[in-house]
Amino acid sequence: MPKRRPSDPSPELPFDPSDRDALMRDLQRLLGQQQFNSIEEVNAFLHREVMGKPLPRVKGTTNRERAEDLVMAAQAERSIAKAKKLLAEALALDADCVMAHLALAELAEPAAETIAHCRDAMAAAERVFAAEADDHRPPVWYHPLGRPYMNARFLLADTLWSIGDRRAAIEEAQAMLALNPGDNQGMRYVLMEWLMRAGSLAEIDALLAAYADEASAVWRFSAALHRFRTHGSDAASNKLLRAAMASNKHVVPMLLGRTELPTEQPMTVGFGDESEAVSYVLAALPSWFECGAISWLEEHAPTSGARRTKRR
């Protein structure tokens, strides 16, 4: 999701336009202009006209498509005022333009305004979903409006958490996973940290059981911490901790203050690398301190000559 920045004297848009979204939109429009009688004809068209060639820019022909074009133009704008004008024009063409509502939510500064625009985006998408036959609608993430709809829900949950409405944020995240069990957004990792701070033991158990993320340090360290919080330092919790430490060597030094910890989340995260450790520790550090797990970790951490750094 695009990161929002606070206002400054010369505000610029916080958009990071996705070329992939534009390509998918153009591909959907290009296919929509054709007439196919079978999936074989679709595949033949793709190999003949698309594979290995620049995808042609397909201008919108309906109000909904023209509104989406205006949103894409707004995303290319550097002026917030001009972008908002384009987004208003998009909504005048199509009041249910989910992309426009989401873009306004990403630009909003007060939390209440962000929440309102997120709910507008969700309601618009849900009206479109309701007008379609269920047996012809793809799973939500793969629907043409699925990604902006789910991104609006992600932003809503994050904003609710940031203003202290933790229960509402958790319930929103749980609803997202129910809609999209494949979790293309990685919402389960965010939810795990929220549950560690404000959820029930049963909710954590259920989430751990729903996803077996053996490659994820977030999952392994969360499982170890959860076991320690519920059973203390026993054979099972110690085994889980060893597996967690093996999954990412950078996490423990950061948790123990032996390695300097950045103050901001990394833009991208890779399994087993330093960015994953930073992302996890920045979110999970309070949970480790609150239950006294740092002392347990120190007992089992590999010894090194590294000195403890002053924690910010």
Image (cartoon, grey):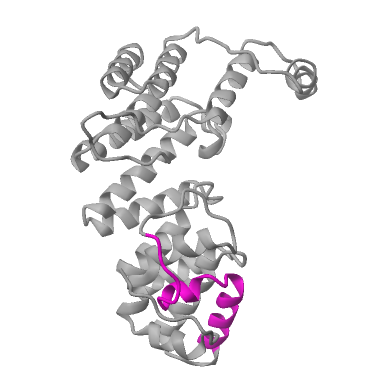
- The image position of residue 196, as x and y in percent, is 37, 69
Residue 256 lies in the magenta-colored region? yes
Q: Observer-nearest residue: 107 or 35?
A: 107
Which quarter shows the C terminus? bottom left
Could you tell me which residue is drawn at 54 percent across and 92 percent down?
Answer: 235
**Main secondary structure found in the magenta portion:** helix
Q: Would you place residue 106 above or below residue 265 in this image?
A: above
Q: Observer-nearest residue: 79 or 271?
A: 79
- The image position of residue 174, as x and y in percent, is 40, 55
- The image position of residue 244, as x and y in percent, is 56, 75
Could you tell me which residue is drawn at 22 percent across and 37 percent down?
Answer: 109
Looking at the rendering, which quadrant does residue 257 occupy? bottom left
Q: Would you place residue 270 above or below residue 102 in this image?
A: below
Q: Observer-nearest residue: 76 or 89?
A: 76
| In this rendering, position of residue 298 left or right of residue 93 | right
- The image position of residue 110, as x and y in percent, is 19, 39
Residue 267 lies in the magenta-colored region? no
| In this rendering, position of residue 268 left or right of residue 76 | right
Which quarter shows the N terminus? top left
Q: Observer-nearest residue: 189 or 299?
A: 299
Could you tell me which residue is drawn at 44 percent across and 78 percent down?
Answer: 225
| In this rendering, position of residue 65 left or right of residue 85 | right
The residue at the far top in this view is: 61
Q: Which residues are magenta?
A: 236-262
Q: Would you place residue 296 above or below residue 181 in this image?
A: below
Q: Would you place residue 247 above or below residue 11 in this image?
A: below
Could you tell me which residue is drawn at 54 percent across and 24 percent down?
Answer: 22
